[in-house]
């Protein structure tokens, strides 16, 4: 099964460079080989459920270790 996941880490930061927790989370997605989209209000990643779930575990750990105070996550099936 393919899924699409979107996550946001807080605290938000104004304009300029993304905060360290957002950068750390993106580095995990980028290294995973999954398709991802890093945006100002959240990051989206899609792929096989098992691979996405494993990647999200590492994303959460990296973000928390880098100063995130909260991570919001939504996951949905990709397709019918």
Image (tube, rainbow, N blue to C red):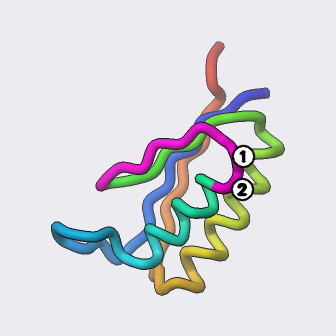
Residue picked out by circle 1: 52
CB under 8 Å between callouts 2 and 1? yes
Quarter-of-image position of residue 29: bottom right
SS under mark 1: helix
Q: Is residue 20 above or below residue 72?
A: below
Q: Is residue 65 above or below residue 28?
A: below
Quarter-of-image position of residue 63: bottom right
User: What residue do we see at 71% from left, 66% from top?
Assistant: 58
Image location of residue 11, percent across then percent down: 34, 77
Image location of residue 26, percent across then percent down: 52, 60
Image quarter hosting the N terminus = top right
Task: Name the residue furthest top.
Answer: 80
Image quarter hosting the C terminus = top right
Per the model, the C-alpha gap separating discs 2 and 1 is 5 Å
Q: Considering depth in this image, is 58 or 3 the residue closer to the camera? A: 58
Q: Is residue 6 above or below residue 71?
A: above
Residue picked out by circle 2: 55
Name the side, left or right, on which 50 lies relative to 60. Answer: right
Does the segment drawn in magenta span residue 11?
A: no
Q: Which mark is residue 2?
A: none
Please state the extent of the stretch shown in magenta in the rendering.
Answer: 31-40
Image location of residue 59, percent across then percent down: 63, 65
Task: Name the residue furthest right.
Answer: 50
Q: Residues within 10 Å of mark 2 (few under 14, many from 20)?
A: many
Image location of residue 61, percent across then percent down: 66, 75
User: What residue do we see at 30% from left, 55% from top?
Assistant: 40
SS under mark 2: helix
User: What residue do we see at 25% from left, 74% from top?
Assistant: 13
Task: Name the residue furthest left.
Answer: 15
């Amino acid at each position: 099964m393919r899924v699409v996941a979107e996550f946001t880490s807080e605290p938000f930061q104004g304009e300029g460079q993304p905060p360290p927790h957002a950068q750390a989370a993106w580095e995990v997605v980028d290294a995973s080989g999954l398709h991802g989209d890093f945006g100002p209000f959240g990051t989206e990643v899609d792929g096989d459920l098992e691979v996405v779930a494993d990647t999200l575990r590492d994303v959460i750990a990296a973000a928390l270790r880098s100063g995130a105070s909260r991570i919001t996550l939504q996951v949905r099936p990709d397709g019918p």
